[in-house]
Each structure stands twice: as C-alpha cells, then as structure tokens.
Image: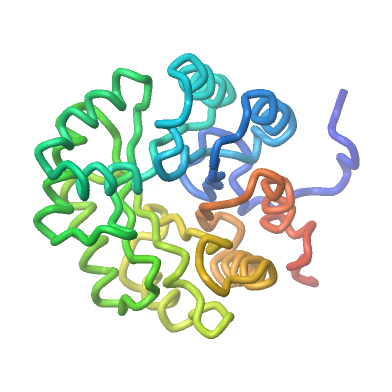
C-alpha cells in the first residue's frame, strides 16, 4: 500500500531516507521499557536516527535488558549511544585512571558510540581531548558535547571546545540546550555565531528540558520551531522526547506549526 495523501509532496530539501548524514533527530531515553521502545520504533523509526541512553541509567538495567535495547535500536537503523554524564560520574568519583576500564565495559555491553561531556564535571581542554582520543583508540565513535547546564558559556568558549573535540576525533558535536535560550527565547546571537563558525552538519542542537531549572514546554517548542525556520528542515536536533519524534518530523517538512512557506 502507498502512503496516505501521496499527492502531497514533501519538501525536496528534507533528507527523507536513512541513513542520513544531516537532518538527524536524536531521542533521549531516560529508561524506557523495551515494550515502549518497540511501540515507538514501530511507527517513528523512519524519523529517528540516534537514541541516547541518558545519564547513568544503564547502570540500573540488567545486562540482558540493556543488550536487548541496544539491539532493538540498531535493528531499526537507530544508533544508540551512552550518555556522557555517566562518564562524568566515573571521572569525578574514581578519577581519570578509571576511564579506560569504563570504556572497555561500554564496548563489551554492545555500545559502539559514547558521549564525552562536562555538564556537571568540568573538563580542561587537555582532559577533553584525552578522553575523546582514548575512546577513539578503543574503536568507539564519540559524540562530543560542548557547553554546560549553567548556560553561561560565550561563543568563543563553545567554538574552542568544539574545535578541541573535533581535533581529538569526535564524529559529531552536541551543543548543550541550556546555552541556546536566553530569557525564555532562542539565543539568536549565539546560534547564528555557531552557524558562522562550525560546520552545521557536524552539530546537533540539544533541546532543553525540565532537567534545567525554569525551562517551560513552550520554551522547548519555541526553540525547535526557531531552529527549523532559521536553519531549514535538515538541521540536526537532539533531546527530542519519545512522544515528539513524529511531531518534530512534521515540523521539519512544513506539516506542523511552523507551516509551509507560501509560494
């Protein structure tokens, strides 16, 4: 059977088919049960590229459950990855000498991608590059996050962190959502500055969420609408909630509240 409403064309500038190299959508998984993941992927998998097993939640799984979840994502061409705050926890509590065995365990369990971040535990430029390089040397792909949940980084700092991460071997960059809004509105100056100085195909803009004090649901949606309207349907968007995957795709193709451009 064909698609419903096939006569309605979708915009050619939107990358429609996976594997995509741009226009990536990343979902955050704070501990979804397997049945819930199956339901989400049954309908939403064509519009989902990445899934973050967030914070240190994977420590609370059984090994069987975690392996089954990673396999389930991959069977739908969704790349799962280990959230960076878990590595921050290990670094803070056991020191840098514990990172190699932590990465070995991540690989043993089936992770192929890890995030290196400093949301709550600051990293020096040397530490950031060293931790990314170590993961790459172990055969893991790395997503490097820049910015902090304090929301106090300036453009030059973010760009320097991004350049350090890429130089160390990071495949993609995640820009912390707390940096992207100011006074409840999209931080246009910062977003446009990042566009001018970093390859947008390598950047995923994280949406903020309730884990950041004072963030409202309307603020999250306003930022998402701004990103699509300002940067186009193939902007990379991260931290999408499970129930918002299809809504995000509708936004990208003009079928949501951003709407089409009138010809």
Image quadrant of residue 7?
A: top right
Residue 123 coordinates in the image, percent (x, y): 19, 59
Q: Quadrant of the C terminus?
A: bottom right
From what the image shows, is residue 185 above or below residue 113?
Answer: below
- Foreground pick, 9 / 116: 116
Query: Which residue lies at the image location 39% right of the left edge and 61% below the top edge?
Result: 175
Image quadrant of residue 46?
A: top right
Residue 194 coordinates in the image, percent (x, y): 37, 71
From what the image shows, is residue 95 above or below residue 65?
Answer: below
Query: Which residue lies at the image location 15% right of the left edge and 36% below the top edge?
Result: 98
Q: Quadrant of the N terminus?
A: top right
Residue 196 coordinates in the image, percent (x, y): 36, 73
- Foreground pick, 244 / 263: 244
Residue 119 coordinates in the image, percent (x, y): 33, 59
Q: How many labels, in total?
A: 0
- Foreground pick, 133 / 236: 133
- Foreground pick, 106 / 21: 106
């Amino acid at each position: 059977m064909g698609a419903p409403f096939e006569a309605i064309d979708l915009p050619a500038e939107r990358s429609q088919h996976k594997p995509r190299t741009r226009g990536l959508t990343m979902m955050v998984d704070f501990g979804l049960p397997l049945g819930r993941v199956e339901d989400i992927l049954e309908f939403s998998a064509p519009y989902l590229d990445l899934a973050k097993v967030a914070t240190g939640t994977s420590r609370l799984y059984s090994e069987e459950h975690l392996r089954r979840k990673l396999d389930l994502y991959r069977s739908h061409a969704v790349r799962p990855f280990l959230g960076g705050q878990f590595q921050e926890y290990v670094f803070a509590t056991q020191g840098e000498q514990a990172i190699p065995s932590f990465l070995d365990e991540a690989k043993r369990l089936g992770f192929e991608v890890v995030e290196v971040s400093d949301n709550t535990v600051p990293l020096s430029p040397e530490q950031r590059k060293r931790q990314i390089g170590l993961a790459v040397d172990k055969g893991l792909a790395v997503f490097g996050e820049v910015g902090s949940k304090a929301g106090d980084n300036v453009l030059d700092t973010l760009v320097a962190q991004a350049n350090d991460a890429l130089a160390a071997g990071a495949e993609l960059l995640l820009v912390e959502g707390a940096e992207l809004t100011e006074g409840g509105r999209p931080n246009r100056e910062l977003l446009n500055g990042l566009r001018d100085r970093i390859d947008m195909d390598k950047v995923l803009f994280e949406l903020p969420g309730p884990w950041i004090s004072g963030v409202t649901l309307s603020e999250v949606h306003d930022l998402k609408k701004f990103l699509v309207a300002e940067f186009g349907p193939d902007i990379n968007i991260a931290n999408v909630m499970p129930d918002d995957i299809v809504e995000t795709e509708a936004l990208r193709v003009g079928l949501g509240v951003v709407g089409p451009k009138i010809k």
